[in-house]
Amino acid sequence: MKLPRLSAFLLLLLLLSVVASTAHDFDFFYFVQQWPGSYCDTRQSCCYPSTGKPASDFGIHGLWPNYNDGSYPSNCDPDWPYDASEMGDLMGMMQTNWPTLACPSGDGSSFWSHEWRKHGTCSESLLDQRSYFQAALGLKKQVDLLKVLQDAGIRPDGGFYSLRGIAGAIREAIGYTPGIQCNVDESGNRQLYQIYLCVDTWGKELIECPVFPRSKCSSRVEFPPF
Ligand code: 5GP
Ligand code: 5GP
């Protein structure tokens, strides 16, 4: 009598662990925002979207599933292509908050389609296409990075600011340490390019980053205007 009960218990444990391991196939999201001034202020330059010059604000680059060891899945499902018709009423918010700056000019669809294919399909067990983009827009609303920096006296005025000051201002305001990436302007100065925040697998709550992206910043970085 004891043995069947033990086997049933083991079977239950096995089932539970299978359910837990397939519940999601990544550990957290990076929510990555780019400073348009720094995207444009490079040798490569940029093109404004066909819908016009974006606001002088951080724009979304992506919501990227990641593993705790720093590696990440990509292009997880070629059978689930980006479907523009699902964006419907999100289009206005997308153009404002997730503008494309790559050349040639476009309305954003090819940027969003790239991000869905490369990253979004890796969280499709939890978020369908619409929920994925909605989650990113919701996160953008949750944290106003430009206001946080400006409130700390860090402005996009072409000046140089300490990297520790930038990270500290964000940590102070939102309670979590950001990852910061820089790129290089035409004169070779390192400038504030992207800010990474970490988010739970539902794309809802900010969390402490399990691992940070590689940075390439100097101790003082330029914050160019846009
Ligand atoms: P880069 O090599 O310029 O830092 O990144 C190129 C692209 O690779 C990014 O735009 C993004 O799509 C992907 N990528 C780079 N680093 C990470 C990372 O740490 N996590 C994830 N999920 N994607 C990344
Ligand atoms: P990732 O680096 O995320 O793998 O690739 C970004 C892709 O989206 C590149 O092919 C890039 O040309 C395109 N793209 C379009 N608009 C933008 C933009 O505003 N910022 C960035 N980083 N990439 C963009």
Image (cartoon, grey):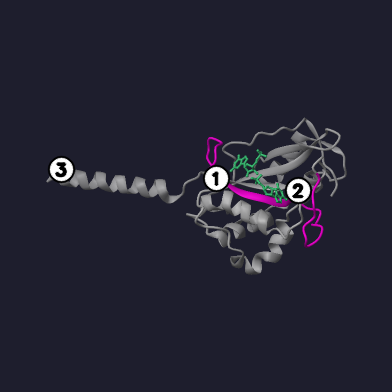
Residue 42 lies in what quarter of the image?
top right
List the single residue furthest toward the front: 104
* Amino acid marked by disc 3: Leu
List the single residue furthest toward the bottom: 89
Whether pointer 3 and pointer 1 mark residues with C-beta atoms closer than 8 Å, the reply is: no
Could you tell me if residue 119 is visible in this image? no
* Amino acid marked by disc 1: Ser
Q: Residue at x 41, y 48 (%)?
A: 22
Using the numbered discs, state the Cα–Cα distance from disc 1 to disc 2 in whole angstroms.
31 Å
Q: Which residue is drawn at 20% across and 43% down?
A: 6
SS at circle 2: helix
Q: Name the residue under label 1.
A: 74
The mark lying in front, picked from 3 and 1, is 1
Whether pointer 1 and pointer 2 mark residues with C-beta atoms closer than 8 Å, the reply is: no
Region rendered in magenta: 45-74
Could you tell me if residue 141 is visible in this image? yes
Q: Residue at x 87, y 42 (%)?
A: 158
Is the C-beta of the residue carrying label 1 under 8 Å from the nearest atom of ligand 1? yes
Q: Quadrant of ligand 1?
A: top right
Judging depth in this view, the residue of 106 and 115 nearest the camera is 106
Q: Main secondary structure of the magenta part?
A: loop
Report the disc number at residue 148.
Answer: 2
Q: Name the residue under label 3.
A: 3
